[in-house]
Structures are given as structure tokens and as C-alpha cells.
Image (spheres, coloured by chain):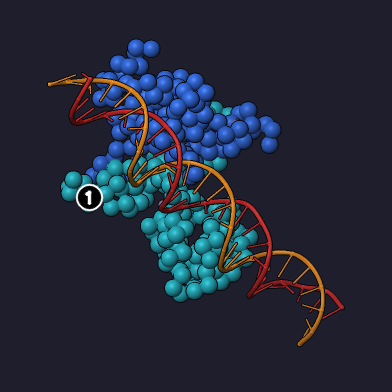
Chain colours: A blue, B cyan, C orange, D red
Amino acid sequence: MTAFKEHLSKHDIKPSVQRLKIYEYLHNSHNHPTADDIYRALAPSTPTLSKTTVYNTMKLFISNGVATVLNIEGNELRYDADTSTHGHFKCKGCGNVYDFRIARAPEFNGVEGFRIDKYEINLKGYCNVCKPKL
Amino acid sequence: MTAFKEHLSKHDIKPSVQRLKIYEYLHNSHNHPTADDIYRALAPSTPTLSKTTVYNTMKLFISNGVATVLNIEGNELRYDADTSTHGHFKCKGCGNVYDFRIARAPEFNGVEGFRIDKYEINLKGYCNVCKPKL
DNA sequence: TTGTTAATTTGTAATGATTACAAAATAGAA
DNA sequence: TTCTATTTTGTAATCATTACAAATTAACAA
Ligand SMILES: [Mn+2]
Ligand SMILES: [Mn+2]
Ligand SMILES: [Zn+2]
Ligand SMILES: [Zn+2]
């Protein structure tokens, strides 16, 4: 996919083989994978891949604006190639992380004059598949 | 403070000495402390206190509804005795976590039928003290 | 009071994700 | 090719959290 190459280049990321594979996987998967998910998915087809590379690459992607990181669960970081404004719902049943759109933006009272760089809305509960099984 | 005792009892938490001290500290501090913050604050006046007790107690407080946990930073859990609906802003300069009120609630599109148990809005950036120093 | 049991607390070891670091491999320019 | 900068890799270290079992304390009946 040369489109991915251009996207990375446009954000000052040299598109190495590893970076391209990681970006391609992240972009095609909509499950908000952890670093370990990415590593385990790519390791078979990239035998020399190192988990450190996944972490390094994700840091690079984030600071260059082609990915975001999700703090929805305390003990794991999840990554997302969708950098548009949207929220996340983590199901306590199946563990899936769902995207949702913010139909009406919230308004805040108490951060006047602050510089807001990042804005995260995280929900937790049970999705409509898991809820009936409770 | 007998008011704290009653508050814990009302939520089915037996008010032991350790639990009371932890709750009192959490309630009086508005800095959203980590487990380690709580431990270090109370250890001098409670020499036998164990960090495990802090973690155990926070889990109990959360499941019994007298505290909430904050996933604003990937590598640390922060606790809050304010269980009312409000958002948090973490300053990348000073590290402080500020509360803010949600003047107008957001509306979501894509979680219809889901059971939402928890709802977190986390902002990051620079507070009005740190912003001018950039 | 004493004895018996359940609840709570404690200390230590284990876990697991992330980071630090330095060597090895690779790419790019001259 | 040769030189140099960049990227990747493997391993060890870090650090927050959890698991676990022993020790302490509380509850309560006899
Ligand atoms: Mn997403
Ligand atoms: Mn708060
Ligand atoms: Zn589910
Ligand atoms: Zn600040």
C-alpha cells in the first residue's frame, strides 16, 4: 500500500518495513490493540520483529500525529490509527473496545485558559451482546 | 470524624482504623493521589501500614461506591473521594490533576442499548499556571 | 472471662507492562 | 566502497499492581 507510505512520509516518519507493517496492521484493525497484540499479530510474518520496536514505533506515531493512545484501562495502553475526535467504550464482558461518535460535544467549567492538547471520553459497562447474558 | 465513620458504614464498609485514615486522607486531599501517595502520606503516623492495605482498601472503596479510580495516565491509578460526575485535567507541566464541572453533558452515537457503568472525561495539556512558562 | 471463628492487615514474592540501554543491522550520502 | 546516521533488536531494569499465606485483630458465643 503506497498510500500508507505517503501518509507516514507526510508526517515526517520514514516508512521502514517495520513501521509500515505496524501502521498497516493498526489501520486495518478496529480493535484498538495493545503493543503486545500488535507484536503477536505481526511476529509470525516478521520473525525478527522486536517488541521494543513496537513500543518505539507507537511513540513515534503518536508524537507525529498518525496514531493516538488510549488510557481506558489502568494496566494497558491501547493504540488507534483513527485520530479523529471520537470516544471509546470498553465492555467488561467481552473486553472489546467500541468506538462511538460524539453527537454533541460537552462543555466544561473550570478549565478556562488551560491549553487542552488531548481530550478523551471513556465509557465502561456491558455491550448489547454481553448485557443479556448477565 | 464520626461523619466519615457513618459514611463508610452506610456503604457496608466496616470502619477500621486503617480504612478511616485512608478515607479521611482521600477526602481531604484534592490532588487525586495514587496508592503510593496515600501510603507515603499516612506511613509516618501509621507505622505498621502496609501498601497492600492501601490497594485492598481502595478496591473496597470503589466497589462500595465511596471512591472512584482515575485512568488519566497510563502507568498510574489515581483515586478520588468525590464520586459526583465531573471531569479531570492533567497538566503536563506541573503534573497536577484538576477537577472541572461538566456544564453540558455530551451526547453519544453508537452505544445505543449498552449498559454504561462508568463515564470518564480526561483532558491533558497545560494549566494556566504552566502555559505562560512554555 | 475464655475460646473459637471470621475479618482484616501485613510482608514478601510474583506478575506484567513499559522503558533503558547498548550492540547489531540497515540505509543513505559521498 | 566507505563513512555516518538511523533504525532495529535483545536483554536487563523499573515500577505499579496483584497473589498469597501468615499474623493480627475483631466479633461473639459459652
Ligand atoms: Mn477508536
Ligand atoms: Mn476529581
Ligand atoms: Zn461485550
Ligand atoms: Zn500546570
Left or right: residue B20 compared with residue A52: right
Above or below — where is C26 with respect to A127? above
Rendered image quadrant of residue C18: top left
Q: Which residue is mark 1?
A: B130
Rendered image quadrant of residue A27: top left
Above or below — where is A82 with respect to B103? above
Type of the residue with mark 1: Cys
Left or right: residue B27 compared with residue C21: right
Q: Residue at x 42, y 61 (%)?
A: B37
Residue A109, percent from left and from top: 33, 45
| Total numbered labels placed on residues in the image | 1
Say if residue A87 shows up in the picture.
no
Residue B43, percent from left and from top: 46, 70
Left or right: residue A1 compared with residue A125: left
Q: Residue at x 28, y 52 (%)?
A: B94
Badge 1 residue CB within 8 Å of ligand 4: yes
**Along the line of sight, the residue nearer the viewer: B103 or C4:** C4
Instruction: Write down the chain letter for disc 1.
Output: B
